Amino acid sequence: MVLSILGKVLIIEALLMLVPALVSVIYNENNHWDFLYPVIGLLLLGGPLNFLKGKENEMYAKEGFVTVAIAWIVMSLVGAVPFVLSGEIPNYIDAFFETVSGFTTTGASILNDVEGLSKSVMFWRLFTHWIGGMGVLVFVLAIIPGYNAGVMHVFRAESPGPSVGKLVSKLSRTAKILYGIYFIMTVVQMVILWAIGNPLYDSVLLSFSTAGTGGFGLLNSSAASYTSHTQIVLAVFMFLFGINFNVYYLILIGSVKKVFKMEEVRIYFIIVLVATLAIAVNILSLCADFGQAMLHAFFQVTSISSTTGLSTANFDTWPAFSQAILIVLTIIGACGGSTGGGFKIARMGILVKSSAADFRRLINPRVVVRSKFDGESLDSETVRNVKTYFLLWVIIVVLSTLILSLDFQGTSAFDGVYSNFSASLACIGNVGPGFDAVGPTMNYCFYSPFSKVLLSFVMLIGRLEIFPILILFTPRTWKRA
Amino acid sequence: MNLLIIGAGKVGSTLVQNFLNENHDIVVIDTDVSRVNDVVNRYDVQGIVGSGLTREVLVDAGAETADFIIACTPRDEVNILCCVLAKKLGAKKTIARVRDPEYFNEMRNMKEDLGLDFFFNPELRTAKEIAEVLQFPSAKSVESFAGGSAEMICFHIGDGNPLDGKTLIEIAKEYGCKLLIGMVSRGNEVFIPRGDFKLNAGDDVHIIASATEIAKFSKKVKLFKPRAKSVFIIGGGKIAYYLAKELLSTGVDVKIVESDPVRADELSKELEGATVILGDGTDHELLAEENIKRSNACVTLTGMDEENVIISLYASSKGVGKVITKVDRPSILEMSKKLGLDTVVSPRECIANHIIRFVRAHQADTSLGINTLYKLDDKVEAIEFTASDKFGFIGKRLKDMQFKKNILIGGIVRDGKYILPTGDSSIEKGDKVIVVAPARRVSDLSEIVK
């Protein structure tokens, strides 16, 4: 079962890789074979796997996690091949980093000059964001019938958020609804971008980048040189893609009332609003007028909150307070059930509320309190899960910062630690740009190959929400007894 | 179809499993978080934690557009109220489990006022099923098709039986009966036999025909046993009560062993004509004293599956002609099949099948035309279809059709009469067609043809 799902994922990737090959043909770039070779490889590998019948057909939680982890790693390993074959990212480790960054919708790049890429390679680079935004496995489950028992585990492992539920009773239909919403919103964004005067190619690619909340740019200046109209459209869509997709489903079926009941979405709105205003006031002196300050603040806040990572301004030069807000936003991240990453607002909310309840118990030791989130009282298992998640998350950030500090020293010790810390945060949160050495105008190319692989896994850990990758590398998973 | 199941207990989860095989959309409601999680993790359904008595939960679960609401929580009152509420919200059909005999009797009168479409009583159904088997004591199980016009009866072929070692063609020639052998289970496997299939001792054969024809045949091949005249029931629960009532009404002697004095007293009050013995059913001296050897049949209905199995094995060893064992827990049910027990009944499976039949028969989308479905080990099914105009081979002779592999026409029922299918038979509009096929291969009559 694990292998045959993997086979199907590889076949889907092969089909998706045909698209950049087509782009290559359209623009006469003569590098379509750079895509077609890996396509053939994927089909040769995936085809037989697809038909493989495993001895054990059952799918439990462990198998679900392992399938997701393996699928994402293999997809990234193969997805990196076109970059190397085309010679545009000759080093395989660099290409792997770039692909992982793409699929995990991080947007951290090792390229100094993105404008030098050919159109087809650039297309593949941004297409990975769009593919990774919603995930591939759930897509596989959506279009292939016949999986019943245990597939929920795969769905849970790949979808972001502390509690993953179905919109409708059938998993496949739930997945179809979610992909439908994703697809339609992306197309709407493309059309709007195109209608306000952007070239078609740019509109399509920018939409991929924002829909997956990825953040790869087409230009070295990220989003800074676009017109303010384009920037507003981008910011609004980054914001929209950071919202739990259940909202759009509820709007579609006409239960707008329920949308307002969703605590996570309410908090997201408030966070974005407050952060935008605070930063706008803080950076007023750096900007021409309040309008420009608002635009910069809004763009950066939505970009970081939704964990996209596009930028219109070099926020590395902003005052400390603004930077501190952006760091906080990087940590919190977007809503569960969106294409965004980060720690997730719902988790943060649960953590804060349950801690507040624990604190109450210190004051009134006999008090009975039941903390609620989203109008439902939290059971102790959910709270325990979120606390474990938080602890692991902190440990990974700390470890990653420690290991990176062996590699990159910076201009001063503080500078090095700060850069490494923000790089770790930006990678686990799938944001992309951090601060200082990895700031919005910089990139990750100066890290050693080892650090790049490390950061690649941190990105995967962030995208798949820690457990799948950790379980994959836990020896106990592979023991028979 | 949209199904809403309230209560994810034994019956609830069995229903989920069976309905999922038919690709329905299912939402399950239960107040217990762990039960909901369990169902959601195992099956592709939506689970909601909450009470089916609250409007909000029902609306969330889609009661307004549900085709069927099935309430099977442990409490009768809750089940009835859930259904009333759901009906008010717009659910098309409601089904409630009502097991208290007092309620159950009044339900017939209140059904319409409450807007209930169907209510079921697992204990009563199980009792009826046991009573059916006691009518045909040599059978392991009895299934009716087309409203009783055709039966499918399972016989066990023992050592020295005249059928041992014969092929189906030889049997047809020798006995010349109008019947058909539809399934044969041997060990862990289930076969859909062809003419050259050879029967062995130890096989369980499922014979499809009219009841009289089967009785004639069973006499000829020494499988016939007369209807049980005296029945020994061990355990005096609800099933025992219903069973005893049913048996007494047909003039069968009934002896019930019950260990609880209060319950024994109740039973003796309510069941006139039955002998109620106060004592422990596992006490072999008591069984000997009450002369279990002399009774035609023994039914073990205590609350403990293990006790039932052990008492049944003991009764068989004492030479009781027919032994029926009640086993409820799925895990023990699987294991007990390997013990060589005579007939095993499971209230849970019995009621699940009963509900599935009701849902099938009342589907809004009747184009499928499935009436009855009987499953054997989840490997082979016998399905009864009603032939409609949509079936493209109306009036054609069977030998002119290209059937798919492993598909058997088990019988055709026209105007309440069973017709043994031959190459020259044809399927006419309105006929009930019994199809034997591997599990989940056929869901529409036209799927039997290539």
Image: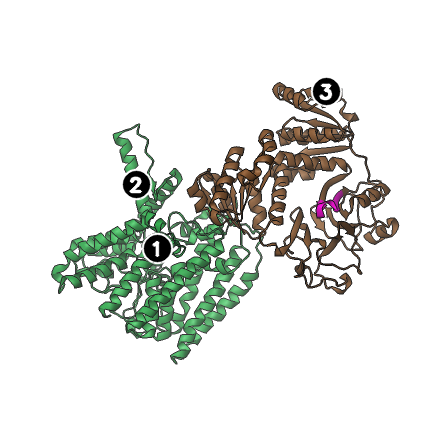
Please name the color used to draw chain A: green
Badge 1: chain ID: A
- Does the magenta-highlighted stretch encompass residue B148? yes
Mark yes or no: residue A224 visible: no
Judging by the rendered image, the residue that carries numbered circle 2 is: A353
Chain brown in the figure, letter: B
Q: CA distance from mark 1 to mark 3?
A: 72 Å
Tell me where residue A331 appears, x and y as whole percent: 28, 51
- Crowd rating for badge 1 (residues with CA inside 10 Å; few <14, some 14–19, many 20+): many
Task: Specify the principal SS of the magenta part.
Answer: strand
Residue at left offset 13%, top offset 62%? A286
Amino acid bearing label 1: Val
Mark 2 in CB contact with mark 1 (< 8 angstroms): no
Judging by the rendered image, the residue that carries numbered circle 1 is: A458
Same chain check for tags 2 and 1: yes
Q: Earlier in the sequence, mark 2 or mark 1?
A: 2
Name the quarter where the C terminus of chain B is drawn: bottom right
In front: B85, or B349? B85
Mark 1 in CB contact with mark 3 (< 8 angstroms): no
- Crowd rating for badge 2 (residues with CA inside 10 Å; few <14, some 14–19, many 20+): some
Tell me where residue A241 appears, x and y as whole percent: 33, 59
